[in-house]
Amino acid sequence: MDEAIVESVERVIRVMQGNLGEPITIDDMARTAMFSKFHFSRMFLRVTGVSPRRFLSALRLQEAKRLLLTSSLTVADISHVVGYNSIGTFSSRFSLSVGVSPTTYRKHCGYVPPLEEHPRTDRPARDRHPVLRGSVQHPPEFRPRRVVLGLFPERIARGLPVRHTTLDGAGGFGVADVPDGTWYLIARAVGLGVDAEHDTYVAVSGPIKVTEGRPVRPVDVRLRRKSIFDPPALLAHLDEAMLAISAGSYGRTLETASTVA
């Protein structure tokens, strides 16, 4: 990809990060990137996999998550800090994207119960949806402790996945009973180190089209270090799985969260 395009998109993302509480329009972003509005939107989508508006919204909600855990600001104050004029709109979007309300996220210190496994179906095998199989691969310098894989309707981990699975390390996987549709398989992993922010690896595969009665081609998931071009994973259940492990206190964290509740 053209280096100038990548640098322009990075420049826009850094402006987003530094001005989360300010109104930022597509026109503003295009001027920062020094592209026409139409060309900028296409290039941003090409580099990041999501639209500029989606990316900015994800950054704002991720900052809201951070403030809920690290500050004494009220939910109303936080909503304004990250650029929302209506606390109702903020709370609604936060709940939809993160999976819990801002108040619940703060109450549980960011740690919520793990994602529930999809219940087994008692339908005959011939009537079940396909199984998505594949393998998780990682670069030599990275040793994954746990890998969470979820199927989402877009290239961003917001809201609950339609299906998911968790692996203790890399290797083969199978996601059962995948419903019809077009999905993106998002993987998120943290290594054996203690620095989750810099030891987070991700991968996105797709679009994966699933049609009942037809086999799904296996997917090779190749983990890479998370970069500035990757939108935040907003789903709180991923925070629980990743942050607790990186802190080496998975069991103790869940116990603390249930005590708070």
Image (tube, rainbow, N blue to C red):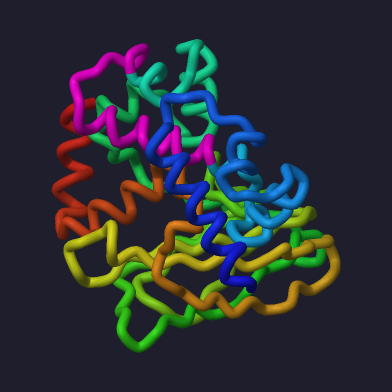
User: Whole-percent x and y of residue 42?
Assistant: 73, 53
Q: Nearer the viewer, residue 173 or 98?
A: 98
Query: Which quadrant is the C terminus positioned in?
Result: top left
Query: Which image quadrant for residue 218?
Result: bottom right
User: Whole-percent x and y of residue 153?
Assistant: 68, 49
Compared to residue 27, the image places residue 135 above or below, namely below
Q: At x 50% / y 11%, what residue is drawn?
A: 86
Q: Nearer the viewer, residue 142 or 165?
A: 142
Q: At x 26% / y 59%, what residue is drawn?
A: 196
User: Whole-percent x and y of residue 236?
Assistant: 40, 41
Query: Which quadrant is the N terminus positioned in?
Result: bottom right
Q: Which residues are magenta?
A: 56-77
Query: Which image quadrant for residue 31?
Result: top right
Q: At x 20% / y 61%, what residue is drawn?
A: 195
Please name the predominant secondary structure of the magenta segment in the image: helix
Q: At x 58% / y 66%, what residue is drawn?
A: 4
The residue lying furthest to the bottom in this view is 140
Number of disc labels? 0
